[in-house]
Amino acid sequence: MADTKKEQERDELHRAIWAIADDLRGSVDGWDFKSYILGFMFYRYISENLTTKINKDEWDAGDLDFDYAKLSDEDAEMAREDMVQTKGFFILPSELFCNVRRDAKDTEATFKNKDGNIRSVVENLNEKLEMVFQNIENSANGSESEDDFKGLFDDIDVNSNKLGATVAKRNDKLVKLLDGIGEMKLGDFQ
């Protein structure tokens, strides 16, 4: 019985990956495609893993309504040091996979880029993702996990012309990639 369930889950995962491949077909070669899929799956995984850990700690402490994904970045900063010690990295709530995915479709969603300029996530999803990946890597600087996270997302070029000739076309592909990965039923990663 368990083998049948595993086969069904594997088949569903393969179908989801093929659906993403259909969306990216013609623009991204096999190696790059693998880098995007695995990189975004890992980004989703560490986002969910961190959120689950922080939420569980708060729920165990009695705050049953707590949701890290809904916390302000400023309030979340209090957890940075502990999470880097515990998990080896840190992700702000606004940079979690689920929130970046949601904001990629929200015309009102903005972020402050590395130059301090306020930008629209919809129009600048590539910049947002580049900044998020850099922030995740940088969160481990000076910790035991620094070497594990250094260059972790280097193979994901969110500004590549392979995704599209214009920023708008690249961002459209990135939204499809986020949605495809977000729709995957990956089960309980614990």
Image (cartoon, rainbow, N blue to C red):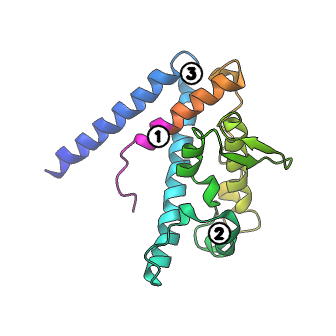
Q: Is residue 147 visible?
A: yes
Q: Which residue is mark 2?
A: 76
Task: Evaluate if marks 2 and 3 touch, with contact meaning CB atoms under 8 Å apart.
Answer: no
Q: Which region of the structure is painted magenta?
A: 179-190
Q: Residues within 10 Å of mark 1 (few under 14, many from 20)?
A: many
How many numbered marks have been drawn onto this rendered protein structure? Answer: 3
Give residue 36's position: percent from left, percent from top.
Answer: 57, 35
Please give the name of the residue rendered at 35% of the width and 38% of the height, measured from the top-left corner. Answer: 13
Among the two numbered marks 2 and 3 on one chain, the one whose residue lies closer to the N terminus: 3
Q: Residues within 10 Å of mark 3 (few under 14, many from 20)?
A: few
- Note whether 34 is above or below 116 in the view shown: above
Which mark identifies residue 29?
3
Q: Which residue is mark 1?
A: 181
Give residue 157's position: percent from left, percent from top.
Answer: 68, 33
Label 2 and label 1: CA atoms lie apart by 25 Å
Label 3 and label 1: CA atoms lie apart by 18 Å
Q: Is residue 151 visible?
A: no
Q: Secondary structure at mark 1?
A: helix
Judge whether residue 181 is colored magenta.
Answer: yes
Give residue 21's position: percent from left, percent from top.
Answer: 46, 25
Label 2 and label 3: CA atoms lie apart by 38 Å
Residue type pointed to by label 3:
Asp
Circle nearer the viewer, 2 or 3: 2
Residue type pointed to by label 2:
Ala
Residue 168 lies left or right of residue 119; in this view the side is left
Please give the name of the residue rendered at 55% of the width and 43% of the height, measured from the top-left corner. Answer: 101
